[in-house]
């Protein structure tokens, strides 16, 4: 197989808030992973574990406390000219959890979608601008009559489609979707995920898909990373992670997912993660190690040896 091309490389990234104060938070604490061109990397973990902060730091909404993010080999957080910054802002887009809060209620849909087109001068005339808006509306399953309406006139699922159209308007390469379906009715969630899949295929997009539970993530992700208190504790191909979760925290997350299978449900045992079970010694090095090919787990040397025996 040809070497896969890396689009995003996150290296020892740290994002601390209130550094040196009593309320210091190590929201992202030394995490490293790559995102390959054209793939979807799912990022899961319970609320407050640092998923959004990871996404926001990658996209430079925050200055990193330490570490690096490379995008197409270029350091996102390095010194940049305004023109370079603008290019990053165009190539990396974000879709948010709450389309209600992320769309300006006083702006018409056409202006919301065209905002990036205007900022980056991507349309030569008013007509070209509107045609782009119409085309984008159709791309996300809405229609041109929607251009003159306001966000409150739409359902949650439609508003998320508008958010997607706005992100697509500047022809990005990489989209960070921060819990894009969590606020939607379950019946609508699959539609939005299917739309994102379709767009990815058509446009060769790369996604970081953030979610707090593992059920929909499996369906969209090629690989999945699991976060726990600011650290990445496991990373593997989606199927592999579901079939052979190794870190006890991942096992507990998976054991919490109900499946529509009565036999499975009868035998499903909820596992509770107890971090003290690791019993790490004071100077023991706990790091991200490759237990099986492409399957990484945060562990000590002795756990590593035990996991290798047990799982490979
Ligand atoms: N701007 C901020 N200032 C201070 N603390 C923050 C800020 N943003 C997030 N945090 C804290 O960082 C941790 C991770 O938050 P977040 O990245 O939002 O988690 P998640 O998206 O996984 O729910 C939480 O403890 C949160 O309270
Ligand atoms: Mg979040």
Image (cartoon, helix red, strand yellow):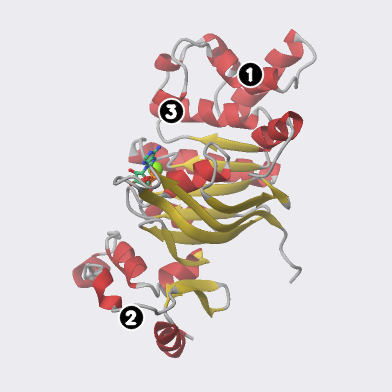
Find numbered disc 1 in the image and state the secondary structure of the residue it sits on: helix
Q: Are marks 3 and 1 in contact (CB under 8 Å)?
A: no
Report the residue marked by disc 2.
281
Q: Quadrant of ligand 1?
A: top left
Residue 247 drawn above or below residue 148: below
- How packed mark 1 is, by other alpha carbons closer than 10 Å (few <14, some 14-19, many 20 or more), is many
Cα separation, mark 3 vs mark 1, equals 16 Å
Q: Are marks 2 and 1 in contact (CB under 8 Å)?
A: no
Furthest toward the right, the residue is: 124
Cα separation, mark 2 vs mark 3, equals 46 Å
Q: Nearer the viewer, residue 41 or 17?
A: 17
- How packed mark 2 is, by other alpha carbons closer than 10 Å (few <14, some 14-19, many 20 or more), is few
Quarter the N terminus occupies: bottom right
Q: Residue 140: in sight, yes or no?
A: no
The residue located at (53%, 80%) in the rendering is 292
Q: Nearer the viewer, residue 154 or 76?
A: 76
Find numbered disc 2 in the image and state the secondary structure of the residue it sits on: loop
Q: Residue 47: in sight, yes or no?
A: yes
Report the residue marked by disc 3.
99
Residue 280 drawn above or below residue 177: below
Left or right of residue 211, residue 265 in this image: left
Could you tell me residue 85's position as x and y percent?
Answer: 69, 34
Could you tell me residue 135's position as x and y percent?
Answer: 67, 23
């Amino acid at each position: 197989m040809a070497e896969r091309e890396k689009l995003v490389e996150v290296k020892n990234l740290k994002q601390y808030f209130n550094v040196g104060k009593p309320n210091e938070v190590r929201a992202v604490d030394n995490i490293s992973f790559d995102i390959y061109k054209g793939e979807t990397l799912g990022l899961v973990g319970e609320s407050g574990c640092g998923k959004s902060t990871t996404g926001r730091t990658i996209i430079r909404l925050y200055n990193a406390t330490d570490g690096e993010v490379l995008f197409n080999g270029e350091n996102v957080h390095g010194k940049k000219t305004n023109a370079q910054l603008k290019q990053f802002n165009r190539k990396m887009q974000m879709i948010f959890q709450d389309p209600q809060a992320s769309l300006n209620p006083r702006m018409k849909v056409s202006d919301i979608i065209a905002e990036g087109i205007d900022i980056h001068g991507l349309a030569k005339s008013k007509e070209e601008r509107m045609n782009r808006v119409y085309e984008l509306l159709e791309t996300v399953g809405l229609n041109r009559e929607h251009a003159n309406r306001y966000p409150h006139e739409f359902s949650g699922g439609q508003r998320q489609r508008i958010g997607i159209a706005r992100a697509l308007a500047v022809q990005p390469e990489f989209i960070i979707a921060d819990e894009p379906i969590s606020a939607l009715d379950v019946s609508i969630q699959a539609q939005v995920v299917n739309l994102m899949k379709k767009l990815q295929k058509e446009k060769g997009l790369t996604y970081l898909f953030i979610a707090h539970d593992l059920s929909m993530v499996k369906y969209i992700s090629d690989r999945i990373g699991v976060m726990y208190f600011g650290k990445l504790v496991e990373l593997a191909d989606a199927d592999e992670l579901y079939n052979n979760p190794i870190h006890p925290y991942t096992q507990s997350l998976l054991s919490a997912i109900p499946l529509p299978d009565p036999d499975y449900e009868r035998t499903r045992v909820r596992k509770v993660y107890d971090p003290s079970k690791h019993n790490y010694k004071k100077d023991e090095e706990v790091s991200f190690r490759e237990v099986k090919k492409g399957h990484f787990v945060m562990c000590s040397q002795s756990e590593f040896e035990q996991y290798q025996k047990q799982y490979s």
